[in-house]
């Protein structure tokens, strides 16, 4: 009889224990679901932030001169690594002088992105919906190496590139004679095709770079009265060249 009572008590204890753990498990699931609803982030957003935290190597940025930046404000951008890995819709800003990319961490400390980034696409610029692309990895030219970020004005078989740099100059203000310092912007256009990157300072540079279609390009330049220092004209030439292969 005592044995029967003992077994009965064990059974009831096990039954109540199982019910307790089932209830606890259900409570945890509901709490987790509720938190996920309250934090206002979709699964995709949380995944992107986790990927950024785990995969983006950062170091504290040094002093950043605002004049060197593509835009002083942080703008939404997509990043593409050399491996093809994509990080989307995070805010960055780009130092054009030193080809450095910056990101604000969770406590709003400015950090420099250490990982190699091949392409940066700024989605919009403060209400302007125009997409702006920057890319590195082009063959070196002048004092610009493969790590230099160019703004890509025309992509394709031949790319039209814009490089922006800055130089500090000392001037004398007249008629006061007071010395002043200012920073001038230096803008240069380059073309890149195959293993060559060429600075575009005369129409012959374009014809030589696009030698496989030199006859067509020469005719187009003459017909359209292309001006080498006019960005819109350079865009027309490179767009035309790339269309010959479509």
Image: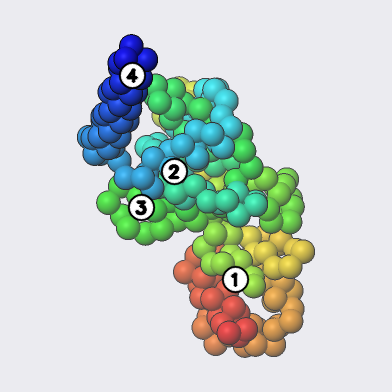
The residues bearing labels 2 and 4 have C-alpha atoms spaced at a distance of: 59 Å
Q: Residue furthest right?
A: 195
Say few, some or many: other residues with alpha carbon within 10 Å of mark 3 (under 14 / 14 to 19 / 20 or more).
some
Residue at position x 73%, y 56% from top?
Answer: 139
Say whether residue 188 is visible. no
Residue at position x 64%, y 42% from top?
Answer: 116
- Asked whether 132 or 22 is in front, the reply is 22
For disc 3, the marked residue is: 124
The residues bearing labels 4 and 1 have C-alpha atoms spaced at a distance of: 85 Å
Q: Earlier in the sequence, mark 1 or mark 2?
A: 2
Secondary structure under the numbered disc 2 in the rendered image: helix
Residue at position x 60%, y 79% from top?
Answer: 241
Secondary structure under the numbered disc 1 in the rendered image: loop
Which of the two marks, 1 or 2, is nearer to us in this view?
A: 2
The residues bearing labels 1 and 2 have C-alpha atoms spaced at a distance of: 29 Å
Which of the two marks, 4 or 3, is nearer to us in this view?
A: 4
The dot on residue 4 is 4
Tag count in the figure? 4
Which of the two marks, 3 or 2, is nearer to us in this view?
A: 2
Secondary structure under the numbered disc 3 in the rendered image: loop
Image marks 4 and 3: residues in contact by CB distance under 8 Å = no
Say few, some or many: other residues with alpha carbon within 10 Å of mark 4 (under 14 / 14 to 19 / 20 or more).
few
Here the colouring is: rainbow
Q: Position of residue 142 (x, y in %)?
A: 74, 50
Say few, some or many: other residues with alpha carbon within 10 Å of mark 1 (under 14 / 14 to 19 / 20 or more).
some
Q: Earlier in the sequence, mark 2 or mark 4?
A: 4
For disc 2, the marked residue is: 48
From this view, report whether residue 16 is shown above or below residue 34.
above
């Amino acid at each position: 009889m005592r044995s029967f009572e003992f077994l009965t008590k064990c059974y009831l204890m096990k039954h109540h224990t199982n019910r307790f753990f089932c209830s606890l498990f259900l409570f945890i699931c509901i709490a987790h679901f509720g938190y996920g609803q309250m934090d206002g982030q979709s699964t995709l957003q949380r995944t992107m932030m986790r990927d950024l935290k785990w995969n983006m190597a950062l170091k504290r940025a040094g002093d950043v001169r605002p004049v060197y930046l593509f835009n002083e404000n942080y703008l939404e951008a997509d990043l593409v690594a050399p491996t093809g890995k994509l990080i989307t819709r995070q805010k960055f800003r780009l130092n054009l002088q030193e080809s450095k990319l910056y990101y604000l961490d969770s406590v709003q400390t400015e950090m420099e992105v250490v990982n190699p980034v091949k392409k940066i696409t700024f989605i919009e610029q403060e209400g302007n919906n125009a997409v702006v692309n920057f890319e590195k990895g082009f063959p070196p030219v002048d004092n610009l190496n493969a790590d230099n970020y160019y703004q890509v004005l025309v992509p394709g078989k031949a790319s039209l590139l814009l490089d922006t740099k800055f130089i500090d100059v000392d001037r004398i203000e007249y008629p006061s004679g007071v010395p002043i310092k200012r920073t001038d912007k230096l803008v240069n256009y380059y073309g890149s095709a195959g293993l060559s990157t060429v600075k575009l300072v005369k129409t012959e540079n374009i014809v030589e770079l696009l030698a496989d279609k030199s006859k067509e390009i020469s005719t187009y330049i003459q017909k359209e009265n292309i001006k080498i220092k006019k960005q819109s004209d350079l865009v027309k030439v490179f767009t035309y060249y790339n269309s010959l292969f479509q």
